[in-house]
Image: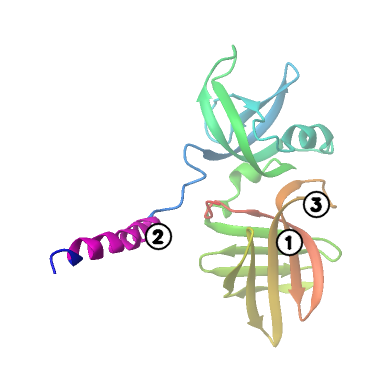
Amino acid sequence: MRAVRPLVLFALLPVFAGCQLLNSKPADTNAGLTRLQGELVSSNDQLVFQPCVGQQRYLVRDSANTTLVQDASYMPNSPGKLFADIRGRFVASQTPGTDGEVELQQLYRLERSNSACQDPNFKQLTVHANGNGPAWEIQAGGKGMVLKREGQPDLALPYVEEQVGDGRFSLSTEANNQHIELWVAPQRCTDSSNGSVQHLGAELRINGQIQRGCGYFGGARND
């Protein structure tokens, strides 16, 4: 019987190894990265990022080849500062006249606005989406969502979120005998009304009727 015990022990080793693999945590793709909102300004033919809070100036390095540089160049020259919501790695200065550099990894939103830095709802939002023709807007957070539509009263609604893979998800609810869904997918999207760029494509579906638009993650979502 003594000769059998070692065999049983070795037979169980792959099982223990499998348990360790299953219990291991997935790598945090945002480790070492910071998300900030602020203003983009041009300096010596380069983009400089100034956060909403503080006086720091960070030279933008588009290390992930996002569309930020091109989008900033083609953004409509309408009134308002060039607001940007970005995630990147902020490092010490290597360029005179700046406090550091930001190695850009993700562009969430780029638009002309004088008030985006003071948005009181941003930190509570998980998802914001909007579209045109007719105009609509959804603001979703931990306590529910608000649906705004041109010519109709605002609706405050609970919702259920469903993940469907590849970064796509939906928010769905029932209200006033209407089935309402917001479908969201990660893709560059340009708002046709003001030229703003957002990192999500969105579809609002009400009783099967579809209206398309754009969206972005709010401050309460760390994707």
What residue is drawn where x is 70% and y is 77%? Answer: 180
Residue displayed at 71% across by 68% down = 148
**Which type of secondary structure does the marked residue at label 1 adopt?**
strand
Residue with the most extreme bottom position = 177
Identify which amino acid the numbered label 1 is placed on: Ala
- Residue 1 lies, in percent from the top left, at 14, 69
Question: Which is closer to the viewer, label 3 or label 2?
Answer: 2
Q: Which mark is residue 191?
A: 3
Mark with earlier residue (3, 2): 2
Left or right: 74, with 80 as reference point: right
Q: Secondary structure at mark 3?
A: loop
Q: Residue at x 54, y 20 (%)?
A: 99
Q: Which amino acid type is shown beneath numbered disc 3? A: Asp
Using the image, tell me which numbered label, if any, was put on residue 202: 1
Q: Amino acid at mark 2?
A: Leu
On the image, numbered disc 2 is attached to which residue?
Answer: 22
Which one is nearer the viewer's eye here, 88 or 216?
A: 88
Circle nearer the N terminus (2, 1): 2
> Does the residue at mark 2 contact the one at mark 1 (Cβ under 8 Å)?
no
Residue 128 coordinates in the image, percent (x, y) = 65, 58
- Which residues lie in the magenta part? 5-23
